[in-house]
Amino acid sequence: QVQLVESGGGSVQAGDSLRLSCAASGRTFSSYFMGWFRQAPGKEREFVAAIRLGGGRTYYADSVKGRFTISRDNAKNTVYLQMNSLKPEDTAVYYCAASRENIFSRSAIHYDYWGQGTQVTVSS
């Protein structure tokens, strides 16, 4: 089992950058496929980015491709989401998620563990 704690959210202006961090407990972090999701008010939770166990393969939603970068440091049990050129439509609660299966999925149901979320607000 793994516990996830996100940090790094905040309120910024359009065009600014933020880096989210997700710290995981446990000694088996490197065995989890990690993802970031977000949920805006009144909307479904949506996939943002994901990264394989060793960090060699990453996946992005079309809406963030070229602006966001996911990475992981298995030695620090942490996954990051660097967000550049933020837009008002990026405003949401951002969640870190872990899957026991090393298989990419955009669906939240395939992730086994979730953090509590961190708020990102982008104003125009």
Image (cartoon, rainbow, N blue to C red):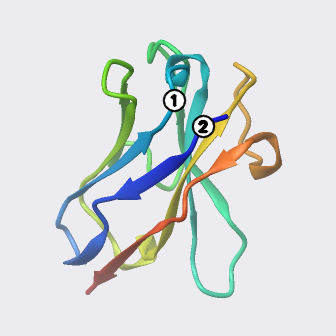
User: Going 82% across and 49% down the picture, which residue do you hit?
Assistant: 109
The residue tagged with tag 2: helix, strand or loop? loop
- The residue identified by callout 2 is 2
Image vertical order of residue 96 relative to residue 29, above or below: below
Residue receiving disc 1:
26
Q: Position of residue 44 (x, y in %)?
A: 72, 72
Measuring 39% from the left and 42% from the top, which residue is drawn there? 23
Image quarter in which the N terminus is found: top right
Q: Quadrant of the C terminus?
A: bottom left
Say if mark 2 contacts mark 1, CB within 8 Å: yes
Q: Amino acid at mark 2?
A: Val
| Residue 106, percent from left and from top | 71, 43
The crowd level at tag 1 (other Cα within 10 Å; few <14, some 14-19, many 20+) is few
Query: Disc 2 to disc 1, how far (Cα)?
Result: 6 Å
- Residue type pointed to by label 1: Gly
Q: Residues within 10 Å of mark 2 (few under 14, many from 20)?
A: some
Judging depth in this view, the residue of 101 and 13 nearest the camera is: 101
| Quadrant in which residue 65 is drawn | top left
